[in-house]
Image (spheres, helix red, strand yellow):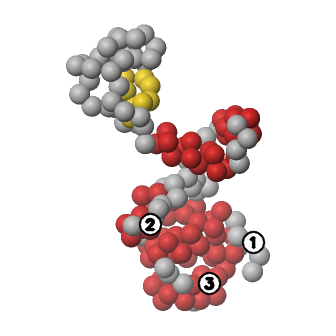
Amino acid sequence: MKEMDYVGRKLRRLMDDRGISIRKLAKMTGLAKRTIELALSSPEGRTLETMQKIAQALEVPLNLLLSPDPIPGWLLQGGSKGKEVEVSVRVPKSFVDRLRKTAKELEQEPDEWICTWLSDVISMHRYLCPECNRSFAAETDAKYCPYCGANFEETIDEPIVQ
């Protein structure tokens, strides 16, 4: 079998996440096992009818299977079983390049450092200052705006999460 394109990789990822083999997917869709293998490996092996049946069996929108966009984490069922769920996001290459450069300057392994950094950022709260109207992130309850120094302890009840 030749290397999969993004549709094939998405199909494989969704099947693996749900614990569905090629044989099981063939049974679920009423398609031949070879048809599923071709859908995984080759754009030429896919018809709209085949993809509709596969999308229905995997309980995902057809446009998600056909688009180059990553699979949203909420569609992956692994998270409901207590596992970590991989979530893909699109960020400008220049941003990732800056993160890699920072990691190297800190003498850290770039991929590991970026994952740790992103995990830290995700766990922060997002606040909006009522005085200067700028947003910022903080790990704990914020009392002062880092931009204008305004004390807004009493004006914001909870963080704005984005």
Q: Which residue in the protein does label 1 denote?
A: 3
Q: In what element is the residue under mark 1? A: loop
Label 3 neighbour load within 10 Å: few <14, some 14-19, many 20+: some
Amino acid, disc 2: Lys
Seen in the picture, residue 106 relative to 66 is either above or below; the reply is above
Q: Which residue in the protein does label 2 denote?
A: 83
In the image, which disc is placed on residue 35? 3
Q: Are marks 3 and 1 in contact (CB under 8 Å)?
A: no
N-terminal-most mark, 3 or 1? 1
Amino acid, disc 1: Glu
At x 42% / y 30%, what residue is drawn? 138
Residue 111: x, y in percent? Answer: 67, 50
Say which of marks 1 and 2 sits in front. 2
N-terminal-most mark, 2 or 3? 3
| Total count of labels | 3
At x 52% / y 58%, what residue is drawn? 86
Q: Residue furthest right?
A: 2
* Label 1 to label 2: alpha-carbon separation: 28 Å
Q: Quadrant of the C terminus?
A: top left
Say which of marks 3 and 1 sits in front. 1
Amino acid, disc 3: Thr
Residue 35: x, y in percent? Answer: 62, 84
